Image: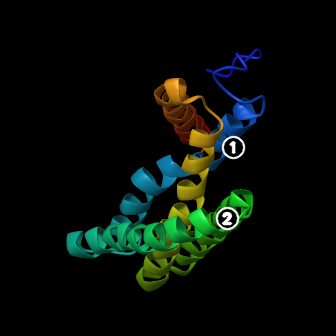
Amino acid sequence: MLNKEIDSTRFTPDFNHMLKIVILNSLGFFFIGFSVPIIARFNMLATAIQISLIFSIQVFGRTISGTITGFLTDRLKSRKKLILIGSIGRGTSYFIIYSAIILNSLILLGIGTFTLGFMAGVFWVPFNTLIAEKSNKDNRSEAYGKKNSANAIGQMIGGVIG
């Protein structure tokens, strides 16, 4: 997946660096998808409906930001700035989620997961656009496949060290 040599007709030279970003950005997915519902249920005594609302609000955040970020991605010159904002925002959302766990606050957990969803949209929309731009149109599916593999590697690493 992260071959040292890249066929310059298929991908730009910095394509593998983008895959490393995906690995780093997916380290926390296991924690959010697996551990947070358990913590919410057993430590915060959340009901099944409350847990489902917490995760639905994450999807709602991504829905809102996807539309806005898609508009901005097409109009701004620097997609990298949006990706950076999304990365910082996701880091901030993890801080909010960790604070919610420490403070035992379902409301703060909801705010954190909404922020995570919103900032994930800010990150992934321009990132996927860059994936398309940094790959030959005949190799675009391979490029997205490599991105998905990098995502899975990050999730596995995050699950082990998480």
Q: Is residue 142 left or right of residue 34?
A: right
Residue type (three-letter) at the residue carrying disc 1:
Ile
State the residue in front, 61 or 136. Answer: 136
**Which mark, by number, is residue 82?**
2
* Residue type, label 2: Leu
> Mark 1, residues whose alpha carbon is within 10 Å: few (<14), some, or many (≥20)?
some
Return the residue at label 1. Answer: 21
Q: Residue at x 53, y 24 (%)?
A: 139
Q: How is the image coloured?
A: rainbow
Q: Secondary structure at mark 2?
A: helix
Task: Name the side, left or right, on which 54 lies relative to 130.
Answer: left
Across and down, in percent, residue 14 comes to: 77, 34
Q: Quadrant of residue 76?
A: bottom right
The residue carrying pointer 2 sits among few (fewer than 14), some (14 to 19) or many (20 or more) residues within 10 Å by Cα, namely: many
In the image, is residue 16 above or below residue 21? Answer: above
Percent from the top left, x then y, of residue 158? Answer: 58, 42
Q: How many marks?
A: 2
